[in-house]
Amino acid sequence: MDDEFLFSSNSLTDVFRARSADAEHEIDNWDPGYLLKTPDSEIMDYLVGKYELTCPVLRRDQLEQEPVSEEVRTVTGQFSGQPAEQRLTKIIVVVAFDGEPDVFGLQPSSLTLNPPRAHVDAAQGELRLTWLGDPQAGRNAAAIRQHFDTLLDSIEQYLKWSCADIEGHNARLRAQISYRLAQRKHRLLADRQLATDLGFRIRRTPDAADYAVPVTRSKIVTPRRPSASSAASAEPFLADTQYEEALAVLRNARNALERSPSLTATMSEETIRDLFLVFLNAHFEGAAAGEVFNAHGKTDILIRVEDRNVLIECKIWAGPKKFSEAIDQLLGYLMWRDTKAALILFMRTGQPTEIIAKAISEIEGHPNYIRSVARGEDGERYDFVLHPASDPDQEIRLAFLPFALQDR
């Protein structure tokens, strides 16, 4: 089979646009019951795996050469003008690749006027590179080897351009799916709440009893902490595993939104808090709630167990003084029974590194500060131990998660 020009068919941009639209369409048309009862992480894994692209990588260290063969071509005689046969020496080099073969036919945003030629064997995961030469012109192994090296260099350059485009698409796709998923879940939950508020009895659909959800969400496990008095009832506290799961949900949601500044630039803090609530409720079976706790609309996000606040999250940034006041307010709403909290900091303007340093300084300089526990990689998470205002002997675990948003 003859070689064809690579990277010269449809554009990668068109494919990206089509895949993103298909992902959104699938989210919008998913069964509401299944969507609400399936963890976001599983939906994300499925949709990202289905609609992202994997850039091919050549196994250049595993080149193989097929036996030398002949190819007969019909040419027109230079002087006679009559058709004549020409026998050419044909050498084929095979290079295996990993990744999606369709990428070899798609045009990246950067290109040249002379794209490389090869045959893509999608079934075998191989590229077949060809050299054709006139045996009468002499045999030069070094020149033939240079032909293949130059061709492989050109293919890898195109792959480098394609991979840069694909990495950008995959990052945008994750943010887009996360945002669209949160939007639809938020709308579905609002519709259900509206139906509940109306007060009518909900008619069951004929197949309601037959519907089964293939996966289950995490349940909040709340071990009992023995109280000092044997006569008093044990108080609930949030298990470390669930606390870490909740923080992972928040970090994943934050990372997805940070990768899509065009979306977050138009979102208010209240809207993002609502999205976090959707993420948490999707993972923890509706145990998360949002409550207004001051006149400025700064809202706690918490997981409630038996009327106890076992996870509280606050999100603000308006300078060191306001941040310190937010810590006061957060600790003021933590009772001695509440042992774990999370604080997400929104940063719309300024240098994130400087803001984070100021925020950490405020935490470590706070009168209720006890010690620092750990710091995550690349400023992703910081952990501290503080005590509530009402009990200096009680320790509160505080996870600080900074969040950089594009300014509107």
Image (cartoon, helix red, strand yellow):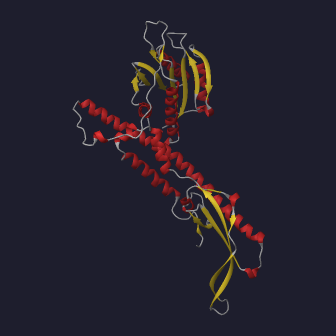
Q: In x, y percent, where is residue 270?
A: 42, 31
Q: Is residue 326 visible?
A: yes
- Please name the residue shown 57% across and 18% down the image: 385
How many marks are shown on the rendered structure? 0
- Please name the residue shown 60% across and 23% down the image: 360
Which residue is situated farthest in the bottom direction here?
80
- Please name the residue shown 39% across and 23% down the image: 292
Name the quarter where the N terminus is drawn. bottom right
Q: In x, y percent, where is residue 124?
A: 58, 62
Q: Considering only vertical position in the picture, is 89 above or below 16?
A: below
Of residues 180 and 72, the one nearer the viewer is: 72
Q: Considering only vertical position in the picture, is 262 above or below 322?
A: below
Of residues 77 and 265, the one nearer the viewer is: 77
Q: Is residue 265 visible?
A: no
Q: In x, y percent, where is residue 192?
A: 30, 34
- For residue 106, which quarter of the picture? bottom right
Q: In x, y percent, where is residue 24?
A: 41, 48
